[in-house]
Amino acid sequence: MVEVEVIDTTELGNRSYIAHDGRVAVVIDPQRDLDRVEAVLANAGVTCGLVVETHIHNDYVTGGYELARRNGVPYVLSAAESVSFDRYPVEDGDRLAVGGLSVEAVATPGHTDGHLSYVISDGEGPPAVFTGGSLLYGTVGRTDLVDPDRTEELTRAQYRSARRLAAELPDEAAVFPTHGFGSFCSSAPTAAGPTATIADERTRNDALTEPDEDAFTARLIARLTAYPAYYAHMAPLNRQGPSAADLTPPQPVDAVELKSRIAAGEWVVDLRDRTAYAAGHMAGTVGIELGRQFATYLGWLLPWGSPVTLIGETAGQVADAQRQLTRIGIDRPAGAAVGPVPGECSYRRVVFADLAALGDGLLLDVRRDDERATGALPGSLHIPLHQLLDRLGELPSRRTIWVHCASGFRASVAASLLARAGHEVVLIDDDFAHAMTAQR
């Protein structure tokens, strides 16, 4: 059986893989912070013999080009993709040998036009198929990222690609998707579980259990939701052959310089948890709690190309944030401050049970449209978080704004943006399920 090492990037909901025969490895869809990949190769005692990309990624900057360059090995990419660098172009049915492994390219368009899956076998045990954004666990990759006007066309292609894999591979073939672990590249929530086989997908994957292509197409398109704005910049960066991440510490910045940058309208981002931020923060900062969703929402909200300065309690916190940001093409923070934060400003944190005290305050819901459609509080104004900066003019200046989302994280980001814009805010830091209870 092919040995497979999994490298999780939980913050973006993706996985990279290292498939090997005990001596030589194929690296599939590596992220840009290559120290993680190199550590896994070293721990497994294998060398990198080939780097393959399932597609030109829309949700992160690849490390594939640089990893192949460092190791002097082929960088395999679909011949149909237009890129500005030399690569090893492959088409449907092409086979490569790496050590004791056979690597076959299988055209699986849908998530992108030139999407490939790779079937890797050692000639003895069952094969492993690396499906990128095609066949995911229980569903498939979204089909509206290439061109919204081609969504139906690509959805139909995605349906046929998934069914082709199921038809051509044995039940025991292991399935290893890149997306589908929280990524916005998934067209729907994925099935639980760390691994799966083709047999598993035959029984649960909506592209395989739905016999009607028209019905599948209509259902997938209907459930597509908003995706991060920074996605628009990922494919162009990946077509240029991006360099590795530069994770050297950013320039230290003191409180005087922080205030100068804030006064100039720059983004100074406080990484502390939302409880600490609400209790006291520097005026004009943006609070985005460091965690799994940090880079996604900073990349979604920050005007592309704008400088960003980080505030962290520790150097490790800043380094973690920097690593997350480099994966989405925010290469170098403009600076960082580490240590205690001046508590010049604060705002209240409440739960949904406290809504009785709303008075003449405005209740603001910053969930996505699809979340709002499942239930909303009467009288609330709805502005999804990713639209908030463009719609600040719709908010009254003399009413206190009570802001909520589904769990408190996005509401905390919204509260900081509203406070930065001069509004008086109250953060509802609570699970939305409690809102329904409070209304009864």
Image (cartoon, grey):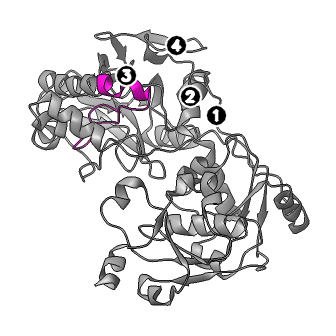
Please tell me which of labels 2 and 3 falls first in the chain: 2
> From where the camera sits, is residue 369 visible?
yes
Question: Front-most of 233 and 419?
Answer: 419
Tag 4–tag 1 contact (CB < 8 Å): no
Q: Quadrant of the N terminus?
A: top left
Locate residue 352: give its quadrant. bottom left
Q: Along the line of sight, which residue is nearer the eye, 368 or 397? A: 397
Q: CA distance from mark 4 to mark 2?
A: 20 Å
Q: Nearer the viewer, mark 2 or mark 3?
A: 3
Which secondary structure, mark 1?
Answer: loop
Please name the amino acid that badge 1 sits on: Ala
Q: Amino acid at mark 3?
A: His
- Disc on the earlier residue, 4 or 2: 2
Q: Is residue 296 left or right of residue 332?
A: left
Q: Which residue is label 1 attached to?
A: 244
Task: Give the labeled residue for mark 2.
Answer: 67
Q: Is residue 308 left or right of residue 153?
A: right
The residue that disc 3 covers is 115
Looking at the rendered image, the disc whose residue lies closer to the viewer, 1 or 2, is 1
Q: Residue drawn 37% across and 60% down?
A: 372
Locate residue 347, reporting x and y percent: 65, 81
Which residue appears at 47% of the width and 14% of the height? 81
Under circle 4, the secondary element is loop
As drawn, the label of residue 82 is 4
Region rendered in magenta? 133-154
Cβ–Cβ below 8 Å for labels 4 and 2? no
The nearer-to-camera label among 1 and 3 is 3
**Which mark is on residue 358?**
none
